[in-house]
């Protein structure tokens, strides 16, 4: 399909990109896993995999069950999501641009041969080898910077490690064991340290109470009923955030979304005979 941008991932940062590209007039197809594990679900399109659709700042993403259905709805200008974690449909669709926004810091199979122009969020990719452009995702002076050769500055595996060796993770809540999550609190509610926010039902039949780690606004929690692994992030609490901010795209996601749009437009400007519209 012509004039198509495929985005791998539908989490918080990916959704900032998807929102930006859609509002700029591009056709966007999102590829997700069947059971997404995003916590900041009020600003993530990934919930469409569970509910059929998800809205972020007046833009709605719809789930399609088949490729023909997706293609038909994309032509209408809708943002479409499909379950395709391995991106198998890419070979059939031949997208103009592919954006890897999975952000799991591990090889995802994305490579330059998958689209005419490939963009990935670092770390974990080498610009010029794995993909055409890497976008810096580490907070700080270089957030959103486009890298056309080499790795992002937050890539400890390739000599550029600047990650804090002991980051403060008190605001994050992790699963203490394997099991299924039962959510007890709604995103945007104010919670107190020690207050139960979820139950974890283990395979052994035990129920573990999961408590808030700090006082603050519950800005994210994993989808109810999802199976999780020990050590997996399941919730996010912010000590100073306002409740309304749980429903709007973050500064980081908006910055990276703009950077991806810049990368797309910069590439297109070098092809005067090519038009997206």
Image: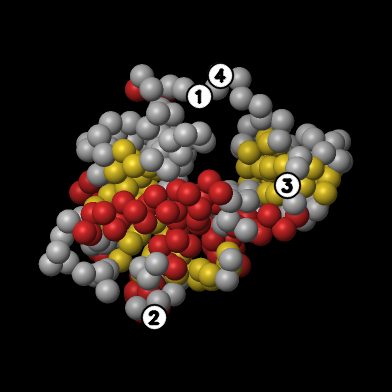
Identify the mark nearer the N-term, 1 or 3.
1
Q: Report how far apart the C-alphas of labels 3 and 2 lie in the structure.
A: 37 Å
On the image, numbered disc 1 is attached to which residue?
A: 163
Q: Would you say the residues marked 4 and 1 are in contact, meaning their CB atoms lie under 8 Å apart?
A: yes
On the image, numbered disc 3 is attached to which residue?
A: 241
Q: Report how far apart the C-alphas of labels 2 and 1 lie in the structure.
A: 43 Å
Image position of 204 (left or right of 28): right
Residue at the spot x=66%, y=59% of the render? 247
Q: In this rendering, is residue 39 above or below 128? A: below
Q: Report how far apart the C-alphas of labels 2 and 4 lie in the structure.
A: 47 Å
Residue closest to the eye, 225 or 82: 82
**Residue 182 visible here:** no
Residue closest to the eye, 175 or 56: 56
Identify the mark nearer the N-term, 2 or 1.
2
Identify the mark nearer the N-term, 3 or 4.
4
Q: Would you say the residues marked 1 and 3 are in contact, meaning their CB atoms lie under 8 Å apart?
A: no
**Residue 271 visible here:** yes
Identify the mark nearer the N-term, 2 or 4.
2
The mark lying in front, picked from 3 and 4, is 3
On the image, numbered disc 4 is attached to which residue?
A: 165
Image coords of residue 124 (percent x, y): 38, 34
Identify the mark nearer the N-term, 3 or 2.
2
Image position of 213 (left or right of 71): right
Image position of 201 (left or right of 71): right
Q: In this rendering, is residue 99 above or below 108? A: below
Q: In this rendering, is residue 45 above or below 58? A: above
Q: Report how far apart the C-alphas of labels 1 and 3 lie in the structure.
A: 24 Å
On the image, numbered disc 2 is attached to which residue?
A: 76
């Amino acid at each position: 399909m012509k004039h198509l941008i495929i985005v791998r991932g539908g989490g918080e940062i990916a959704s900032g990109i998807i929102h930006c590209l859609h509002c700029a007039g591009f056709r966007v197809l999102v590829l997700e896993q069947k059971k997404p594990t995003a916590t900041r679900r009020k600003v993530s399109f990934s919930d469409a995999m569970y509910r059929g659709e998800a809205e972020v700042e007046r833009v709605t993403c719809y789930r399609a069950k088949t490729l023909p259905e997706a293609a038909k709805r994309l032509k209408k200008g809708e943002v479409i999501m499909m379950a395709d974690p391995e991106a198998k449909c890419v070979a059939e669709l031949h997208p103009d641009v592919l954006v890897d926004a999975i952000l799991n810091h591990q090889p995802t199979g994305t490579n330059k041969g998958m689209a005419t122009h490939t963009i990935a969020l670092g770390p974990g990719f080498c610009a010029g080898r794995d993909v055409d452009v890497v976008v810096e995702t580490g907070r700080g002076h270089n957030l959103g910077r486009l890298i056309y050769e080499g790795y992002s500055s937050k890539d400890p595996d390739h000599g550029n490690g600047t990650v804090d060796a002991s980051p403060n993770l008190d605001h994050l809540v992790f699963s203490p064991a394997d099991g299924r999550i039962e959510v007890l609190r709604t995103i945007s509610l104010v919670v107190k340290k020690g207050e139960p926010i979820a139950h974890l039902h283990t395979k052994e039949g035990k129920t573990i109470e999961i408590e808030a780690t700090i006082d603050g606004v519950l800005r994210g929690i994993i989808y109810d009923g999802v199976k999780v692994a020990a050590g997996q992030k399941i919730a996010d609490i912010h000590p100073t955030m306002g409740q309304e901010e749980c429903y709007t795209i973050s500064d980081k996601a908006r910055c990276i979304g703009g950077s991806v749009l810049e990368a797309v437009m910069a590439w297109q400007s070098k092809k005067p005979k090519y038009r997206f519209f």
